[in-house]
Structure formats: C-alpha cells, structure tokens
Amino acid sequence: MDPVEPSKKLQAPEIIMQTADVKKYEIISDTSKIIHDGVIPATASLAKALLEDDKCPKANKVFIAMKEGHNTELADPSFLAVIIEKSLKA
C-alpha cells in the first residue's frame, strides 16, 4: 500500500504526525528531525516522502513532529485538537 500518491492528490486538509527528535510537538517543514518510529524507518516515512517531494502540494498539509512512537498514545492531544480546530475554521 503506497500512501504517498493518494496523499499528494488529496485536496482536503491533512495532518501528518511523525516521530521526530523533538521534546514537544512542533510543526515541521523539513525532514531534519524525522526518526525511526519503532515500526517505520525515517527514510520510509510518509512525512519524509512528502516533504522532500517538490511536486507535492503542501498548502493543505500540516506536518507535526512528535516524540511518541508508532501507535503510541499521544501525550498531549490538545495540541492536535488546536490544529484540527484551525483547519476547520479555514
């Protein structure tokens, strides 16, 4: 299953959460902090593929770096809630 092409075609707002070398949640625009999430290597992540693709439209995407690993419960869901709320108002 290749999520890259469908994501590139998606016109609705999209939030991509990626394990990264960060202490708290942050919005990223490059791949420098992306790390292995415990299941998917950084080099194979959706966030890396999209961020490094010059042809990928990124205006409708938010890339969130987080310390949690793959399928790990979010430490602070309120950060994500704020991003979702902002996208609904846009």
Image (cartoon, rainbow, N blue to C red):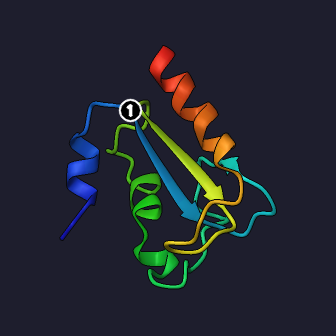
Residue 13: image quadrant is top left
Is any part of residue 90 visible from this angle? no
Q: Residue at x 59, y 37 (%)?
A: 81
SS class, disc 1: loop
Q: Residue at x 28, y 48 (%)?
A: 7
Compared across the picture, whether 38 is left or right of 52 comes to right
Q: Position of residue 66 (x, y in %)?
A: 66, 60
Q: Is residue 63 above or below residue 2?
A: above
Q: Residue at x 40, y 76 (%)?
A: 44
Q: Residue at x 71, y 52 (%)?
A: 76
**Which residue position is annotated with label 1?**
13
> Number of numbered discs present?
1
Q: Residues within 10 Å of mark 1 (few under 14, many from 20)?
A: some
Q: Position of residue 56 (x, y in %)?
A: 34, 44
User: Which sits in the foreground, 90 or 2?
Assistant: 90
Q: Residue furthest top?
A: 89
Q: Is residue 11 above or below residue 80?
A: above
Compared across the picture, whether 38 is left or right of 23 comes to left
Q: Residue furthest right?
A: 23
Q: Is residue 56 above or below residue 66?
A: above
Picture quarter with the N terminus: bottom left
Q: Looking at numbered disc 1 in the image, what kind of residue is underneath it?
A: Pro
Is any part of residue 41 visible from this angle? yes
Q: Is residue 20 above or below residue 42?
A: above
User: Which sits in the foreground, 55 or 20?
Assistant: 20
Q: Position of residue 31 (x, y in %)?
A: 58, 61
